Structure formats: structure tokens, C-alpha cells
């Protein structure tokens, strides 16, 4: 990934690590979600408020590749980039350790839009993301 459209800095908390002292694999999905929500916030969109309006971005598929382990206390950047494919958005994300800039993980998160609980065209998000499409 060249230059992502958004990045968010985080730090590993000790309770996110497993018995081996590395971040448990399930926590990477949390990190990716935090970064996507922060990206929405940077556009003035609040995930919960959108839900209250009947607009939901719903994850339909996740693919995560693990490259290098993160350990407790380490800082990292979680990036966000995306492309539109039909009615889906494919969020392409990476987790990069800040101390050595090593790629720790990369993911593709497929997201669809529900309007009032029904699968819908992502017109709302198309408008919100227009400058990136």
C-alpha cells in the first residue's frame, strides 16, 4: 500500500496478549475496526448515530494475514484504504509497528450497507467517500 487515505496510531495493551506474550490474533480485527470507525469520525460520521438513522455498514467478510507479531506496549499505525466493488466496499488495511516500520498484519474487510435492515446500494457512503473514489 502506497499512501493510505487514513491512519490511526494505537498502542498494544497487555491484556490483549496471549500466553506467548504476543497480541492474540482476534485483537487485530478490533484494531482494524477502531481505525475504520476513526476514519468515519474524521469525515464527521458517527457509526452509532448512523445506526440510529437506519444506516448500517456491516462487515460481510474478513481476510487477515499475519506477518510479524506485536507485543505488549508496542505502538503501531493502522491504515485505512478502500475501493468500491459493485455494492461493496473493500477496506484494505495494514498494521505497521512504529519502532521498525515492520508490517505486522494486512487485511481486506468487505463491507455492505443496510438501510433500515435491508441490503441496499451504498449511496450514502458513495457521497461521503466521493473525494476518495
Image (cartoon, rainbow, N blue to C red):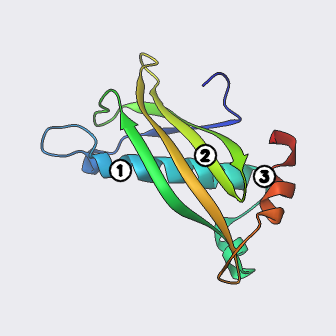
The structure residue drawn at horizontal position 34% and vertical position 28%, both measured from the top left corner, is 67
Q: Looking at the image, which residue is at 60% across and 58% down? A: 111
Calculate the distance from the C-alpha at mark 1 to the C-alpha at mark 2.
17 Å
Q: Which of marks 3 and 2 is nearer the N terminus?
A: 3
Density class for disc 1 (Cα within 10 Å; few <14, some 14-19, many ≥20) is: few
In the image, taking residue 86 as reference, residue 16 lies left or right, namely left
Vertical arrangement, residue 64 with respect to residue 56, above or below: above
Q: Earlier in the sequence, mark 3 or mark 1?
A: 1
Q: Mark 1 points at which residue?
A: 27
Q: Is mark 2 on a helix, strand or loop?
A: strand
Snapshot quadrant of residue 93: top right
The percent coordinates of residue 110 (x first, y second) are 57, 53
Q: How far apart are marks 3 and 2 (CA)?
A: 16 Å
Residue position for label 3:
43
Mark 1 or mark 2, earlier in chain: 1
- How crowded is the residue under tag 2: few (<14 C-alpha within 10 Å), some, or many (20+)? many
Q: Mark 2 points at which residue?
A: 91
Q: In which quarter of the image is residue 73?
A: top left
Q: Is residue 70 above or below residue 54?
A: above
Placement of the N terminus among the 4 image quadrants: top right
What residue do we see at 70% from left, 43% from top? Answer: 83
Which residue is at the front of the view, 89 or 50?
A: 89
Q: Position of residue 133 (x, y in %)?
A: 82, 42
**Tag 1's secondary structure?**
helix
Instruction: Left or right? Give the position of 49 relative to 96.
Output: right
Amino acid at each position: 500500500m502506497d499512501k493510505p487515505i487514513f491512519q490511526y496510531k494505537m498502542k498494544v495493551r497487555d491484556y490483549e496478549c496471549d500466553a506467548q506474550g504476543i497480541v492474540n490474533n482476534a485483537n487485530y480485527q478490533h484494531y482494524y475496526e477502531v481505525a475504520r470507525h476513526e476514519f468515519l469520525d474524521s469525515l464527521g460520521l458517527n457509526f452509532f448515530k448512523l445506526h440510529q438513522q437506519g444506516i448500517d455498514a456491516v462487515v460481510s467478510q474478513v481476510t487477515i494475514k499475519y506477518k510479524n507479531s506485536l507485543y505488549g506496549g508496542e505502538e503501531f499505525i493502522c491504515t485505512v484504504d478502500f475501493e468500491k466493488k459493485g455494492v461493496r466496499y473493500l477496506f484494505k488495511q495494514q498494521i505497521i509497528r512504529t519502532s521498525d516500520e515492520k508490517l505486522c498484519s494486512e487485511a481486506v474487510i468487505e463491507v455492505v450497507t443496510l438501510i433500515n435492515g435491508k441490503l441496499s446500494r451504498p449511496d450514502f457512503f458513495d457521497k461521503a467517500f466521493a473525494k476518495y473514489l
